[in-house]
Amino acid sequence: MSMAFGSPFGSSDPFSDMLNRFFGMSPASSPPAVQRVPIGRLLTESSHELLNLATRKAAEDGTSDLDTEHLLWAATRVDPSRGLLARGGVDPDALADRIAEVLPGESAEPSSEPGLTPAAKRTLALAHARSQAAGVSYIGPEHILGALLGDPDSGASRFLRAEDLDVSKLRG
């Protein structure tokens, strides 16, 4: 795979490099035995913003792991996921505050490159599957939020259940 045009995730930013490593598309890794989907190329601008906010939050907290709680925290900051949460009866700002309370506090030494937890990887893979099922060629924040809702064992899903989110109101 040629890297002449940047990383397979569409840019040469640190977040794309992290996605490359964790999804086995790093130039240092051996060629994949199966065709892998360059998920970063499918992300909308607002999804990139969501993932960058989540990465920044994890780094500020000094954790080495970007988990589903970081993704949900970032989803409260970016539309359309922010609007979907509000439509479902959740106050996005209050939810963000509750999530921030349980995340590690801001560290004097931020983590340089938080990695994706297995749950966060599953969320991104499920977001891709949801976008395909919807018949669209992109992954938007709404797909990431749907994926967070779809993993009942994730920390983010526990937050959403505690909020009494009305999932029926999320559908158009």
Image (cartoon, helix red, strand yellow):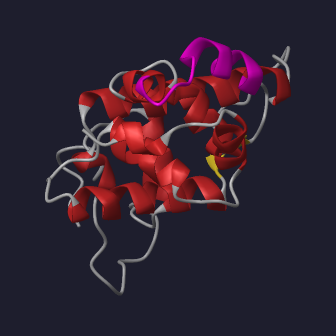
Residue at the image position 43 percent from the left and 62 percent from the top? 125
Q: Is residue 79 above or below residue 9?
A: above
Query: Residue 101, position in %: x, y?
Result: 82, 21
Query: Residue 68, position in %: x, y?
Result: 63, 45
On the rendered structure, is 109 left or right of 2? right
Residue at the image position 46 percent from the left and 63 percent from the top? 23
Taking depth in this image into account, of 76 and 23 the one nearest to the observer is 76
Among the 4 quarters of the image, the one containing residue 83: top left
Is residue 73 among what the camera can see? Answer: yes
On the rendered structure, is 38 left or right of 152? left
Is residue 66 among what the camera can see? Answer: no
Q: Is residue 89 magenta?
A: yes
On the rendered structure, is 21 left or right of 31? right
Q: Is residue 70 above or below residue 107?
A: below
The mark total stands at 0
Q: Is residue 94 magenta?
A: yes
Residue at the image position 67 percent from the left and 32 percent from the top? 163
Query: Residue 97, position in %: x, y?
Result: 71, 15
Segment colored magenta: 87-99
Q: Is residue 158 above or below residue 121?
A: above
Quadrant for the N terminus, please.
bottom left
> What is the chief secondary structure element of the magenta stretch?
helix
Taking depth in this image into account, of 46 and 41 the one nearest to the observer is 46
Residue at the image position 66 percent from the left and 54 percent from the top? 117
Among the 4 quarters of the image, the one containing residue 30: bottom left
Among the 4 quarters of the image, the one containing residue 161: top right
Quadrant for the C terminus, please.
top left
Query: Residue 160, position in %: x, y?
Result: 63, 39
